[in-house]
Amino acid sequence: MSRYGLLIHYEFCSGCHTCELACKQEHALPVGKFGIQVAVSGPMKMDDDRWSFNNIPVPTDLCDLCYNRVSHGKQPACVKHCQSGVMKFGIVEELAKFMELQDKTVLFVPRPYKTNASGANDPASQDQGVMS
Amino acid sequence: MTDKTSSWRWEEDGMTVTRTAAWTGPGCHNACGLLVYSKDNKVIKIEGDPETPFNQGRLCPRCLVLPKVVHHPDRLTRPLKRVGARGEGKWEPISWDEAYDTIVDNVRRIQRDYGPEAIMSLHGTGRNVWHLGSKLCFSAFGSPNIGTGFLSGQSCYAPRIILSILTTGFLPQPDCAQMFPDRWDNPQWKAPECLVIWGNNPVVSHADSVRGDWFVEIIKRGAQLVVIDPRLTWIASRAKIWLQLRPGTDAALALGMINVIIEENLYDKEFVEQWTDGFDALKERAKEYTPDKVAEITWVPKEKIIATARLYATSKPAMIQWGLGLEQHKNGISNALAIQDLWGITGNIDAPGGNIIPRPDPFFELPNHFWGKEDIPRDLLGKRIGAKEYPLITTSSPDILSDTMINDEPYPMKMAWIQTTNPIANMGMDPLKLHRGFRRLDFVVVVDLFMTPTAMACADIVLPATSALERDSIRTENFGKAWWGPIRAINKVVQVGEARSDEQILLELGKRLNPKAFPWNTVEEMLDSMLEPEGITFAQLRERHIPEYHPFEYKKYKRALASTAKGFDTRSGKFMLHVPLFEKLGVDPLPFYEEPPQSPISTPDLAKEYPLILTTGARLWGFFNSEQRQIPEMRELHPDPIVEIHPDTARSLGIEDHDWVWIENNFGRCRQRARLTPTIHPGVVNANHAWWFPEKPGPEPSLFGVWESNPNQLMPFNQCGPTGLCAPYKSSICKVYKVKEGE
């Protein structure tokens, strides 16, 4: 059975926190709570001229993959507003195809938080394909 | 679910959706397209408008948190008059009529007793008040003394605009396909092969009508990236070459690159011969800047200087995104001129994927910061503070004005109208001097969304301003020859208390003071008149589903402009690699390098005591300069002011991560929290700007803690460049040491 996930093309994540704020707004999360959070790796000098410095938005256990939005045909709030356009929502196997083509990607498949009976991560209730 | 009868307002899921543009507040130069969801006079949520080509549905945290700003409990909602001593924090709500009557009485008294020039009118950067405030100053107060928030050397964007008008006829922008509604898909646009980001962290700052994510898109499309920045920003980590230059040495670096490009015959000979003026002089000047000498000045290894010059010159097209990092130095004009010369000698000016002249055809100048100037008699215009000393500056000179407030020379200042700017927290140099000056004035009005340190310290009347979601307005360009995007409607969504828009305040006060100059009965009539050159009304503008883009052409110089019958809109018709006019002002017409006023080289003795170079002013995610400090979601990102220090430097000073430290020099000090990071040069520290603490006591002497962390206390006025433009906000010196317990 296919599942839904969130793909991050983290080579181009600038770390702007937009996903965090878009998520807080969508889910009315107060200060101190996040549905997604930008994790920072580095900056670390690798050799004389190159640095490893990556921002990776990580969905928390409050993430429901924007069940309400998606069931209305919209993108998750983080994907919609992502300034650098580095997030995709869709079926895992579709997203995996993108990963075959690009360096520096990561795929999250959150456990759905507070979904309805059919489950936010149940593709039978949604048929959205890949959205970015 | 969706009832869509209008292109700008409809019902959806029991909410009203309004299409608008975010201009302003939040303070921003950009005006991204928004869809605002509201119900019962309350903003519920904000979505990016996917049909605005400028932001294509994307938003930054500042807009996503707007509902929290609009309905914040600390918003000013009624006009206030001071009832205690200045700075005591005792206010009484009054009616708008009483506020206007008090203002009119004071304006008339000061006009009569001291002349209208004794009134100064100050405005925050990049927002609607740039044209509205000008109109108020010129037509209602009758004063030539328009200004910002005492930004020394007016060192933000204005120097680049003034210079560009002399060299190019118009302020160029990097070509991110922003001139076309279909953006990146437009067949005329070319992806640059090389992108140079110079003195700028665009993904954070989104400055000057250019969104930072546009450059991420250009990198995705394969451009080789060069970043010139004293700090390793995230985008610098993606660069093929990162040049960690010493702050303030940009002109030397650019001249070194020009030298390599000319010596190695990598310049565009055809373009240079046909379309530029001053090449031979520039060539001679650049010879003085050998890679060895430039490496010594800039701290950048000469191999990197040469490689960058070659990469930029041999990539076609190549683009330079230039930032405020160039202008906030004494030598800022030279920095900017040297960079313009780079795109001139490589023929990248007005080329697809290069640096374009963003002038569409037809191009209509809507009211800009000269609006109303015709109402000022010529002899009075000549009384503008700094008109004689610094004729290139189109506003009053903030540096000379800072003296005027203290010494009454050449005439006394008596009143300040301060509209959405907060000079003692942000932008103003030497805020203690400003505080002293403001307190000497007879009468001060502050118009803002929140009670700011500046309002608390010196206001007699405080008027509540609106955010972008509470006003009908238009998005227009701020400056005549710096085209910032298509005209769009800004549509009111909610009313907060008795807050009034800048337009409404202008019209109501203007009609009281000089009715002849304000013939409109309503704000909409005024907006209609502003839109006249465009040939539409405000009602028609707001019905436009997608903003209208006027046709744009690259390499316009190839067909002589009809209006000027010459290639570039300059006196010679050519792209000016030098500025002969500067000679009349006693200023070198070519770019040159000059040490910052205080540096290890210009003041070696002082540098023994203050061995670190201090750079400031870099933007932070979610803050627009001094704004958003009272928004919990933004303070969650930035609880405290931060100074970045290299771990080696910190170790030698006994400073650990997160310690509070003093940043101090011969002019003053402030304190911030240390963040240890290898991304900064060991000889440089980078301090946050514009901090104040709405959670701390407002009345004097605290003023919301405004004196605690403002690094502008380490910088005096009157260190500006020879044209009066540019000042060393990003190149002073300091020492850093730990704050003692209990301090």
Image (cartoon, grey):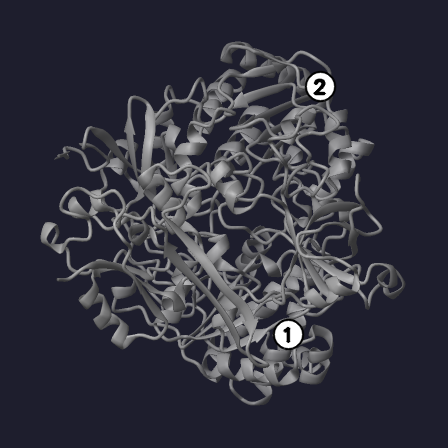
Q: Residue furthest left?
A: A124
Q: Where B399 sits versus A98, above or below?
A: above
Q: Is A116 on the left or on the right of B460, as rendered?
A: left
Which residue is under mark 1? B253
- Residue B77 coordinates in the image, percent (x, y): 48, 19
Cα separation, mark 1 vs mark 2, equals: 50 Å
Q: Where is residue B559 in the image (x, y as percent from the top left)?
A: 36, 68
Residue B88: which disc?
Answer: 2
Amino acid found under the numbered disc labelled 2: Glu
Q: In which quarter of the image is the N terminus of chain B?
A: top left
**Which one is nearer the viewer's eye here, B507 or B433?**
B433
Residue B667, numbered circle: none
Q: In this view, does B488 lie above or below A82?
A: above
A113 w.r.t. A95: above or below: above
The mark closer to the camera, 1 or 2, is: 2
Residue B432 as seen in the image, left or right of residue B227: right
Q: In which quarter of the image is residue A84?
A: bottom left
The kind of residue on which mark 1 rests is: Leu
Residue occupying image coordinates x 71% and y 22%: B87
Residue A43 visible in the displayed image: yes
Q: Left of B544 or right of it: where is B283?
A: right
- Residue B503 is drawn in which quadrant? top left
Which label's residue is closer to the chain start, 1 or 2?
A: 2
Where is residue B319? Give x, y as percent.
Answer: 45, 70
Chain holding disc 2: B
* Tag 1 and tag 2, C-beta contact below 8 Å: no
The chain containing the residue under callout 1 comes to B
Viewer can see residue B491: no
Question: What residue is drawn where x is 73% and y is 81%?
Answer: B293
Same chain assignment for discs 1 and 2: yes
Which image quarter is the C terminus of chain B in? Answer: top right
Is disc 1 placed on a helix, strand or loop? helix
